Amino acid sequence: MRKVTHRRATKETDIRIDLAIEGSGHGDIKTPIPFLSHILDNFTKHGAFDLKIRSKGDVEVDQHHTVEDMGIALGEAFEKALGDKKGINRTGYFVFPMDEALSVVAVDISGRTHLEYKANFKRRWIGDSDSDVIIQFFYGFVRALKGNLHVKLLAGQDDHHRAESLFKAFGKAMKMACSKDPRLLKEIPS
């Protein structure tokens, strides 16, 4: 079973992650930003990972460091848990409808880092969460994972649904990319 305990501590944040790639979708996520905890829980359920997160951050300044470092820490955890990457599918994608919202996320765990992000929100705030820094989560994640990610928000009226749709698609795409192909267990997909 591919699992890892990972900690990232900086002057601004302190994040501890327990990740099991072959999980059952169980999330136990506590961050200082409740909406961030909520969308990470959506990612966990739809990726069928087991994910426990305990996070502190300097949200009294703003949410940037906490959200970006969460992306970095989660990317580092996946990079560690995937190990030598033998047998993984490497790529994954998903189109996720969430009521009126529709998102597409595609990932390639290639060793090359790139982010294409096309997701504009109508409001600056989704509950208690700053929608401007969601892109920083994904930048941090791809840099740490050493992969590339395409995140596209195609439709939707309600920003809550739009953000959930993105993170649910992200979970499904990561599930597909991290899954192993039993025919290629000794191969690195390169």
Image (tube, rainbow, N blue to C red):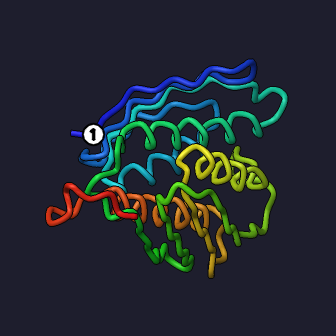
The C terminus sits in image quarter:
bottom left
Residue shown at 60% from the left, 62% from the top: 163
Q: In this orientation, which residue lies closer to the viewer: 162 or 145?
A: 145
Question: Where does residue 105 sit, x and y in percent of width and height?
Answer: 52, 70
- Asked whether the viewer can see residue 46, the reply is no
* Residue at the limit of the structure toward the right, as seen here: 61
- Image quadrant assignment for residue 2: top left
- Amino acid on which disc 1 is placed: Arg
Position of residue 133 relative to residue 76, above or below, is: below
Task: Indicate the secondary structure of the residue bearing disc 1.
Answer: loop
Asked if residue 54 shows in the view, the reply is yes
Q: Residue furthest left?
A: 183
Residue 33, image x and y in percent?
A: 64, 37
Among the 4 quarters of the image, the one containing residue 14 = top right
Residue under pointer 1: 2
> Residue drawn 41% across and 67% down?
91
Q: Residue at x 49, y 76 (%)?
A: 99
- Judging depth in this view, the residue of 157 and 143 nearest the camera is 143
- Relative height, residue 93 to residue 32 (above, below): below
Relative to 100, residue 147 above or below? above
Which corner quadrant of the image does residue 60 belong to?
A: top right
In the rendered structure, the answer to whether residue 150 lies left or right of residue 88 reads: right
Above or below — where is 85 with respect to 72? below
Query: Residue 28, image x and y in percent?
Result: 39, 34
Q: Quadrant of the N terminus?
A: top left
Q: Is residue 185 left or right of residue 164?
A: left
Q: Position of residue 114 (x, y in %)?
A: 65, 61
Q: Is residue 102 left or right of residue 64?
A: left
* Figure label count: 1
User: Are there few (<14), some (14-19), or many (20+) residues within 10 Å of tag 1?
Assistant: some
1 or 130, nearer to the observer = 1
Q: At 50% from the left edge and 25% from the top edge, which residue is drawn?
A: 54
